[in-house]
Amino acid sequence: MSQALIAELAPRGVLRAGINMSNFLLVTGTGPTGDPEGVAPDMAREIAARLGVPVAYVPFARPGELADAVDSDVWDIGLIGAEPARAEKIAFTAAYVEIEATYLVPAGSPLTTIAEVDRPGVRIAVTARSAYDLWLARNIAHAELLRSDSLDGAFERFVDEKLDALAGLRPRLLSDASKLPGARILDGQFTAVQQAVGTPRGNIAGAAFLRSFVEEAKASGLVARLIERHHVHGLSVAPPG
């Protein structure tokens, strides 16, 4: 590895990897040392190994907080959903995994398709500043988005306020549906959250290295092996970038 590349991605001799702890598909737990475990931490560890430096995890409770910290010099790479609003300051790779996002509707709901959700008077519960919230904010024209600070908060608001739909990642919605007799998950998806690796936009060489690494990780089967290693259901390897 060139010294210029190391200077960009690991200027302190360690790769500081920002990890979104709220994504239960990509972070499946913590180890004995307290470090996060899962597909995203393993991807960061592989990147650090390729660079020949140790990895240090920088946990964030929510993806929006990770993205906001791009100017604070607390992480060198961040593993979150690639969204245009975040890409203004973060250079993202192509996605390494995708996660379907759809809606849960309550028992007796007249809503039967994803397209029907975007209608006047429909109220959608959503986790604030999640990747799918950012997508909905750009694309929902008629329905109302009601935001909560956490996944659990969005579910509770959906139930307590008798909202019309709960937006979320399909694996989480499957769990939520099991708590609500008669609730249904709508077929299809309104988007697929593109989980990627990002670095501050000033890291030109670092961004190019990360893009190449992600494409190799998908093509070699590394990403598929990580998904299998952590027994994750609901993740799929993203297509070539």
Image: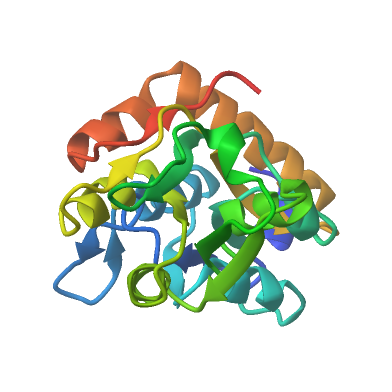
Q: Is residue 75 visible?
A: no
Between 187 and 22, which is closer to the camera in this rendering?
187
Q: Is residue 48 left or right of residue 118?
A: left
Q: Is residue 12 left or right of residue 4?
A: left
Residue 92 placement (x, y as % from top left): 70, 46
Between 48 and 1, which is closer to the camera in this rendering?
48
Q: Is residue 36 visible?
A: yes
Q: Is residue 228 left or right of residue 50?
A: left
Residue 42 placement (x, y as % from top left): 35, 49
Task: Locate residue 232: give its quadrant.
Answer: top left
Between 22 and 133, which is closer to the camera in this rendering?
133
Is residue 241 positioned above or below 8 on the image?
A: above
Q: Residue at x 48, y 35 (%)?
A: 98
Task: Locate residue 211: give its quadrant.
Answer: top right
Residue 34 placement (x, y as % from top left): 24, 76
Name the image quarter holding the C terminus.
Answer: top right
Is residue 202 positioned above or below 58 on the image?
A: above
The count of marks equals 0
Q: Residue at x 54, y 48 (%)?
A: 51
Name the image quarter holding the N terminus.
Answer: top right
Residue 72 placement (x, y as % from top left): 72, 82
Q: Residue at x 45, y 38 (%)?
A: 99
Pick out the residue farthest to the bottom: 72
Q: Is residue 68 left or right of residue 172?
A: right
Is residue 228 positioned above or below 175 on the image?
A: above
Q: Residue at x 44, y 52 (%)?
A: 168
The type of colouring in the image is: rainbow
Between 83 and 110, which is closer to the camera in this rendering?
110
